[in-house]
Amino acid sequence: MTTAPDTTEPARPFSPPQRPLLDVEHLTMRFGGLVAVDDVSFAAAPGDITAIIGPNGAGKTTVFNCLTGFYRPSVGRLALRGNGREYLLERMECHDIARAGMARTFQSIRLFPRMSAFENLVVAQHNKLMRASGYTVFGLLGTRSYAEAEAGAVELARYWLEKIGLVDRADDDAGNLAYGQQRRLEIARAMCTEPLLLCLDEPAAGLNPRESAELEELLLFVRERHDVGILLIEHDMSVVMKISDRIVVLDHGRKIADGTPAAVRGAPAVIRAYLGEADGADTDTHTRADTRRDAGMGA
Ligand SMILES: Nc1ncnc2c1ncn2[C@@H]1O[C@H](COP(=O)(O)OP(=O)(O)OP(=O)(O)O)[C@@H](O)[C@H]1O
Ligand SMILES: [Mg+2]
């Protein structure tokens, strides 16, 4: 006997499953005979920190270069979603990808060293200011919408200077700041473009432990308060394991693991990639635990 549905039960709120902020499907990048990225697929959720890790030459930066339009992928579909739109990045040019909401920092610092910290943050908002000008020179000359956009740009620059603890260095040349301060300024500059997805290529490289802790705090703040997706390439496993929601592991261009920090940390393929163990190698337990701890993979 079938039971009639209980119509007295109040309707439960239904939210459709959220589509990922970023979908990378079958990304392949060849340079002549070298396959730098080989059929890699992964997704990044909005408001998550998704780390991409792997040994040197694994293909991490090449993934970023494909996502940001520096390279045109050999194969693959790269979809960025936000503001009610879906962007197919593999078909777009660098500047259009940046306008769509993709911001990045580089493995080596690329600030304007002879501009002040403040100026670096204002020029990052060039696209917004040009839009407000209507892309005409007359638009720059005293129109209300441009004046408002300019005031907004100054306000946003001040906000990020405060968040990265550099208000008192606002007028100093970016090139004269300490290394860790320049790294934070780069992230602030990327945030001034008000991105959907922030791609950071080894932001902790060369930082001391105090600066690494400040970086972690900044990235967690960005994630919590600005609801920005973060893609994080990083070799410093203590940073990765502490702040990532999800980790994608590459080795020789291929994805070898994808999951939570706890799942990835224990995955045999990941341990092999980092430590170069042969399959089924009978490694001394003490030595292996030590080495794993040194690599930040936990004991
Ligand atoms: N423009 C290019 N032309 C030819 N080969 C390239 C090019 N860019 C990258 N490669 C090669 O692709 C492979 C992956 O390089 P990639 O820079 O993506 O590695 P990575 O994971 O970022 O390494 P690292 O941790 O050292 O930064 C390497 O073998 C590299 O030499
Ligand atoms: Mg790299």
Image (tube, rainbow, N blue to C red):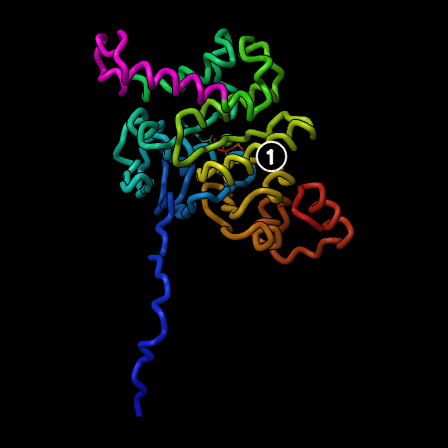
With 292 as the anchor, is 107 left or right in this view? left
Residue drawn where x is 44% and y is 33% of the image: 198
- Residue 162: give x, y in percent of width and height: 55, 22
In which quadrant of the rendered view does residue 22 lie? top left
- Residue 213: give x, y in percent of width and height: 65, 33
Local crowd size for mark 1, using a 10 Å CA cut-off: few (<14), some (14–19), many (≥20): some
Q: Which residue lies furthest to the front in this view?
A: 8
Q: Mark 1 points at which residue?
A: 217
Q: Closest to the observer: 120 or 281?
A: 120
Residue 58 is inside the magenta segment = no
- Residue 96: give x, y in percent of width and height: 28, 27
Q: Which residue lies furthest to the bottom in this view?
A: 1
With 146 as the anchor, is 43 left or right in this view? right
Give the answer, above or below, for where 185 lies relative to 297. above
Does the beta carbon of the residue at mark 1 sit less than 8 Å from ligand 2?
Answer: no
Residue drawn where x is 67% and y is 43% of the image: 296
Residue 131 visible in image: yes
- As helix, strand or loop, the secondary structure at mark 1 comes to helix
* Quadrant of the snapshot with the N terminus: bottom left
- Residue 47: give x, y in percent of width and height: 46, 43
- What is the chief secondary structure element of the magenta stretch? helix
With 290 as the anchor, is 280 left or right in this view? left
Task: Give the magenta-colored segment's residue range.
Answer: 131-158
Residue drawn where x is 55% and y is 38% of the image: 220
Which amino acid, mark 1?
Glu
In which quadrant of the rendered view does residue 236 lie? top right
